[in-house]
Amino acid sequence: MMEIRNVTIVGAGTMGHSLALAFARQGTVSGSLISGMSLVQARKMIASNLQTMVETGWLDKDQQAPMLDRIQTTTRIEDAGRHAALVIEAISEDETAKKELFVRWIRYAHGKPF
């Protein structure tokens, strides 16, 4: 069985940033969030959730910074998708946006310009 070490999560809202935390907590997975939203805001949400995890005893304080470091952010599919072993789509429930995303991803996967 293949060990997955690099996960790309497309979308950094409630679902996307929570998935990134879940994968990063395993310690061997590097998560990449791709989002049109402010990546600064996404990182703030992740840092806040990590702090809550520490405060509630779900996470040791010394695990907080390494987990945050394992989560990379970008707005470019070509940056995040390059080494992804697993890609998870977690964008808003908008049919048009999802279709556009999948067209972009297919074009990227086949080496065609966006």
Image: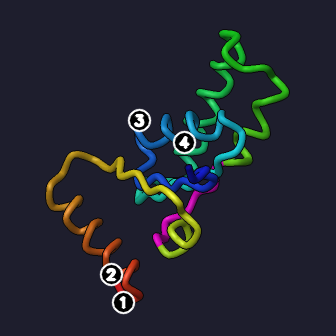
Spatial distance from mark 1 to mark 2, Cα to Cα? Answer: 5 Å
Give the residue type that dot 3 points to: Thr
Question: Residue 57 appears at what percent x and percent y?
Answer: 70, 10
Q: Residue at x 46, y 52 (%)?
A: 9
Q: Nearer the observer, disc 3 or disc 2?
A: 2
Q: Secondary structure at mark 3?
A: helix
Read off the residue under disc 1: 112
Residue 107 is labelled as: 2
Packing grade of label 1 (10 A; few <14, some 14-19, many >=20) is few
Indicate whether 51 appears above or below 78.
above
Name, please, the residue furthest toward the right: 62
Read off the residue under disc 4: 20
Read off the residue under disc 3: 14
**Residue situated in front as seen by the camera: 74 or 87:** 87
Spatial distance from mark 1 to mark 4, Cα to Cα? Answer: 28 Å
The boundaries of the magenta stretch are 71-77
Spatial distance from mark 3 to mark 2, Cα to Cα? Answer: 27 Å
Are the two marked residues, 1 and 2, in contact with CB atoms closer than 8 angstroms?
A: yes
Spatial distance from mark 2 to mark 4, Cα to Cα? Answer: 24 Å
Tell me which label, 2 or 4, sits earlier in the chain: 4
Q: Secondary structure at mark 4?
A: helix
Q: How many marks?
A: 4
